[in-house]
Image: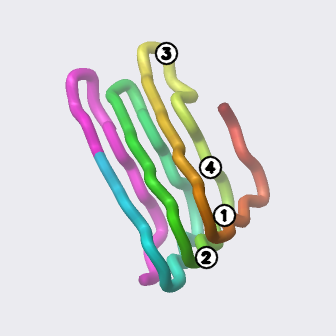
Amino acid sequence: ITTNLINLGDNAGATGDFTMNGGTLNNSFETWIGNFGTGNFTFTGGTINNTIGNIARSTGSTGTVTMSGGTWNNSQLFV
């Protein structure tokens, strides 16, 4: 999969869930896991190539990342 933005839980009261079990995800810009809402990211295998990762970076956000395998490559990661 190739994209330029992933946003899980983008607004207050919103919940976004994403599970990746394998393959490759190329994201040319940002990944938000909890952006004013709640984001849940479960990663059990594969590779994510990402520029900027944000986990619960905004006020009032909740972000959960569960990794039991695979690789998440970021140029920058904000928690």
- Count the numbered circles shown: 4
Disc 2 marks which residue?
47
- Considering only order in the chain, which callout, 3 or 1, is on the residue closer to the N terminus? 3
Which numbered disc, 2 or 3, marks the residue closer to the eye?
2
Contact (CB < 8 A) between labels 1 and 3?
A: no
Q: Quadrant of the C terminus?
A: top right
Chain-order first, disc 4 or disc 1: 4
Q: CA distance from mark 4 to mark 2?
A: 14 Å
The local crowd at label 2, few if under 14, some if 14 to 19, many if 20 or more residues have their Cα within 10 Å, is: some
Q: Residue at x 45, y 54 (%)?
A: 42
Label 1 and label 2: CA atoms lie apart by: 6 Å
Q: Residues within 10 Å of mark 1 (few under 14, many from 20)?
A: some
Q: Evaluate if marks 4 and 1 touch, with contact meaning CB atoms under 8 Å apart.
A: yes
From this view, report whether residue 55 is shown above or below residue 6.
Answer: above
Q: Residue furthest front?
A: 68
Residue 72 numbered mark, or none: 1
Q: Which of pointers 1 and 3 indicates the residue nearer the eye?
A: 1
- Cα distance, mark 2 to mark 3? 29 Å
Secondary element at image label 4: strand
Q: Which residue is mark 3?
A: 59
Q: Which mark is first along the chain, 2 or 4? A: 2
Give the extent of the magenta segment: 1-16
Residue to which mark 4 is pinned: 53
Q: Identify the residue at horizontal 72%, vertical 60% (top origin).
A: 74
CB contact under 8 Å: marks 1 and 2: yes
Distance CA(mark 4)–CA(mark 1): 9 Å
Whichever of labels 1 and 2 marks the residue nearer the N terminus, that label is 2
Residue 17 pos. (x, y %): 30, 49
